[in-house]
Image (cartoon, rainbow, N blue to C red):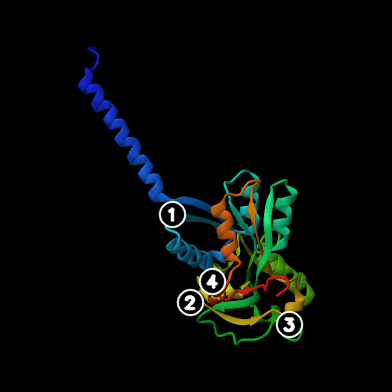
Amino acid sequence: MPEPGPTACKRILLGAALMTASLLATTAQAGQQIHVYAAASLTDAMDALASRYEKRHENIDIVPVYASSSTVARQIAHGAPADIYFSANEKWMNWLSEQGVPLSDRADLLNNRLALIAPKDSEVAPFTPDARHPLAVKLHDGDRLAVGDPDHVPAGIYAKQSLKSLGEWEALMPRLARANDVRAALALVERGEVPMGIVYATDAQASDGVKTLGYFPADSHSSITYPVALVGEHSDDAARAFRQWLAGSDAATIFKRFGFQPVAPSGS
């Protein structure tokens, strides 16, 4: 087969140059990605935050990954390319650090409440689940209560604490419909597969398919706190800037819109 002549070589080189330029342009257009691994309960708020931030920083692409705090923590521990971890409790943030994953710029950003929900068309009247109003008597024979799995899902862990505090854990434990994360528990109630469920107040607010029956007493469980941190030994400037923005007033306004309670900065 004859070798290409000078003109053909020039065309090949020009084509390669054009292809390289095209790839570079595509990369520049896509922008720098920031991977945020976050608790499922943050889905709606984080989507809104990402949209706002990307509009102001056209070269930045926020890539969120949502699941139970335990699931995303394990993914990060196994090498998932996270730049930021946003947990729904302290336990899994501490666990991730104990696995040897470098974390920096850690802070508690948000608080939440634990809510009892029912399908929107439920005839159950609102009540405060407490020692005077036991939850078990509201369930009929064969009914189950949707929760995030108390063995690892933060919302389920808080629910277990509260039910134990109210003296209902032993009676309700065999009747739990355990879900992989709090949004899965919410979905069970939305679809009417169970008559009631325990989720965060923010999850109840986000759904048109459920109604809030009441809130669990704040002193019946640990404070529901959302810590955030940068992941890795050498966080880049883009990830660090976004992490700082999440703690600012613009982000706080969005968090409040979705029902979260921003934690006041230390010393304020």
Amino acid type at circle 4 is: Asp
Q: Are marks 1 and 4 in contact (CB under 8 Å)?
A: no
CA distance for labels 1 and 4: 19 Å
Q: Earlier in the sequence, mark 1 or mark 2?
A: 1
Q: Secondary structure at mark 4?
A: helix
Q: Earlier in the sequence, mark 1 or mark 4?
A: 1
Q: Which mark is in front, 2 or 4?
A: 4
Residue 59, numbered circle: 1
Q: Secondary structure at mark 3?
A: loop
Q: Is residue 78 left or right of residue 119?
A: right
Residue 17 sits in which quadrant?
top left
Amino acid type at circle 3 is: Asp
Q: Which mark is in front, 3 or 1?
A: 1
Q: Is residue 189 above or below residue 242?
A: below
Residue 208, numbered circle: 2
- Observer able to see residue 156: yes
The residue that label 4 is drawn on is 250
Q: Secondary structure at mark 1?
A: loop
Q: Is residue 4 above or below residue 126?
A: above
Q: Is residue 46 above or below residue 104?
A: below
The residue that label 3 is drawn on is 130
Q: Residue 59: x percent and y percent?
A: 43, 54
